[in-house]
Image (tube, rainbow, N blue to C red):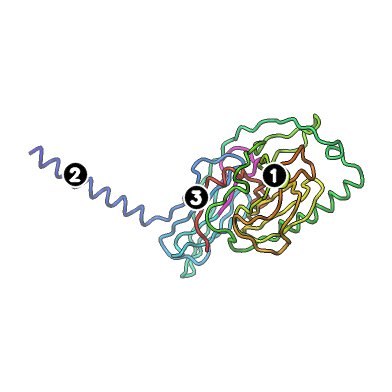
Amino acid sequence: MQLRVFVIAATMLFVVRSGWCGDLLDRDLVVITPQELSNGAPCLFTVSLHDDASHVTAEWQGHPVAFFSGANHRTWFAVAGVDVEVAPGNYPLTIDAELKDGSHRALHEDVAVAEAPYEKVPLSVPDKFVEPDAAALKKIAADKIVKDKAFANSSAKPEWSGNFLPPLHHAPESDSFGNQRIFNGKLASVHRGLDYHAKLGTPVAAINSGRVVLARPLYYEGGCVVIDHGLGLMSVYMHLSKINVAVGRRVRRGQIIALSGASGRATGPHLHLGIRWEGSYLDAAKLFKLEMPQTH
């Protein structure tokens, strides 16, 4: 009798679990990698649909999020991130999937953002970089126009493929991303990049494939290269002593694009690497840890 009851119960449990698994397979799913986000963190959104879609878009933190499809048009990916200065809280992700039959499907996910522990770092630089004179201010204003033009020029498709790799393989990381930088006793900015200790003239590699949208010296940045990886994602390389690429050139992951230096507002020879998505600056060290899909 006890055996019969056990068999009946097990059969019922199997039916319930089978139905539950079937429901999961029929649902549209949104997966966020990593599962826990903090300010400054990049992330990968993966949308798995039950039906083929022709187009998937989203909005998050007031930014548009552009998705690209996998091989079957049911799995879609997007790279996004949380700016270093965003306050902790819940930020709704609203997704619109246009299906092949012309209908639309809406998905919604509340994304929690925690606060990352960033520090204050005192630094000493020449006074001209803390209180620039009239001529320097004119140069800074001109640089801003150049940078704004470059940042507005992102490809409508992913130019990168696979994981992002560090630009230097044997140079240790130094100043942490997100630290508040106090130049000559005055709070100047939040550090929006990752610094590497690198001797003058160290070869600098592209962290992934893309197209060069800026390659020139700037006042604060010194020798600077910006690579567009598509869909609003860009990498910025600063304080370079030599630039080996020109605007418009396509580069591959690992290709040498420049030599490190100490140009611009720098305390010594090093490489500053910035990651920019839709105007937000993200932690490069966290981007390198993400497992990314192949796009081509």
Residue ID at (31%, 54%): 22
Quarter residue 263 falls in: top right
For the residues carrying marks 1 and 2, which lies nearer the camera in this image? 1
Name the side, left or right, on which 44 lies relative to 193: left
Q: Which residues are magenta?
A: 79-92
Q: Secondary structure at mark 1?
A: strand
Badge 1 or badge 3: first in the primary sequence: 1
The residue labelled by disc 3 is 291
Q: Amino acid at mark 2?
A: Ala
Please state the horizontal and vertical placement of residue 226, each as a whole percent of the image. Answer: 70, 54
Q: Secondary structure at mark 2?
A: helix
- Pointer 1: residues within 10 angstroms few (<14), some, or many (20+)? many
User: In this view of the protein, which residue sits in the foreground, 160 or 44?
Assistant: 160
Residue ID at (71%, 64%): 248
The residue labelled by disc 1 is 271
User: In this view of the protein, which residue sits in the foreground, 233 or 59?
Assistant: 233
Please state the horizontal and vertical placement of residue 2, each as a whole percent of the image. Answer: 10, 37
Badge 2 or badge 3: first in the primary sequence: 2
Is residue 237 in the magenta section? no
Q: Quadrant of the N terminus?
A: top left
Please state the horizontal and vertical placement of residue 200, each as a whole percent of the image. Answer: 73, 44
